[in-house]
Amino acid sequence: MQKRRLLASAALAVTALGCGAASLTRTAGAAESPKQAPADNRRIAVVYFTKTGNTKSLAEAVRHMTGAALFRIETVEPYPESYGPATEIVKDELERGVIRPIRPLVFNPADYDVVVLATPTWWHHAAMPLQTWIRSVDLSSKKILTANTHGGGGLMHTREDFEALLAGRRLGTHLTVYGAVNPQDANVRSWLEENGCL
Ligand SMILES: Cc1cc2nc3c(=O)[nH]c(=O)nc-3n(C[C@H](O)[C@H](O)[C@H](O)COP(=O)(O)O)c2cc1C
């Protein structure tokens, strides 16, 4: 039932946003000025959360194209494997404002010029474990690209979440991906190019 409700709301959002299956959108605002450092001077990190592997595939595509270092956020207590119970638990945590602790990440911001943040869409939002990590780190002076993968809902509120968490930071454009991508995905490549990472 939960899953059906979720898919229904996702389908509504698809209609509203005009996002079809396998589509990819970029948000309108927040693009940086075209003056970019040469791509080969940029040290890139991808920090991502994934539960079922779609966002991991996006992180891996970025690594494949740019040589980026990957950092995976994990919760101390994992969410259930199966979709139904996971969605119910996440919904309950969202409603009650529960912060599920994440494992410490060995990440030194000074080592990177560009940080790519990638999240699944969870109940229309950026997944909380990634949000928790963002709150814990100082990304000032970094260029930050953001991305969400989704199950049919498209962008939803994910970019807004990033913008709220990263107010005043240097944001590049946002990439929205339905499901998983392959390592040569053309839309991922274009997104990296438009942000000076390739
Ligand atoms: C708890 C939960 C909530 C979800 N909520 C949404 C949603 O609101 N809209 C949507 O399009 N997809 C939703 N999905 C589907 C995921 O966003 C989508 O499958 C995503 O690509 C999964 O990424 P991952 O494989 O990296 O975990 C949800 C999935 C889960 C587990």
Image (cartoon, grey):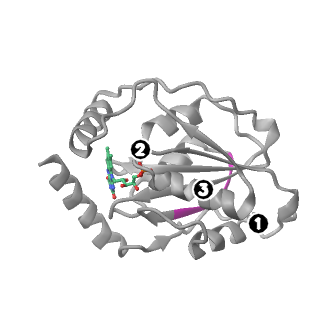
- Asked whether mark 2 lies closer than 8 Å to ligand 1, one says yes
Give the left or right position of residue 42, taking residue 134 as reference: right
Look at label 2 and name its amino acid. Lys
Give the left or right position of residue 152, taking residue 84 as reference: right
- Mark 2, secondary structure of its residue: loop
Image: magenta residue range: 169-175
Instruction: Say the numbered circle drawn on residue 60.
Output: 3
Mark 2 or mark 3, earlier in chain: 2
Mark 1 or mark 3, earlier in chain: 3
Cα–Cα span, label 2 and label 3: 15 Å
- Mark 1, secondary structure of its residue: loop
Q: Quadrant of residue 42?
A: bottom right
Which residue matches tag 2?
51
- Asked whether mark 3 lies closer than 8 Å to ligand 1, one says no
Q: Does residue 176 lie above or below 166 as drawn?
A: below
Task: Pick out the residue farthest to the left.
Answer: 1
Identify the main secondary structure in magenta. strand
Cα–Cα span, label 1 and label 3: 18 Å
Q: Is residue 172 visible?
A: no
Look at label 1 and name its amino acid. Gly
Which residue matches tag 1?
196
Cα–Cα span, label 1 and label 2: 29 Å
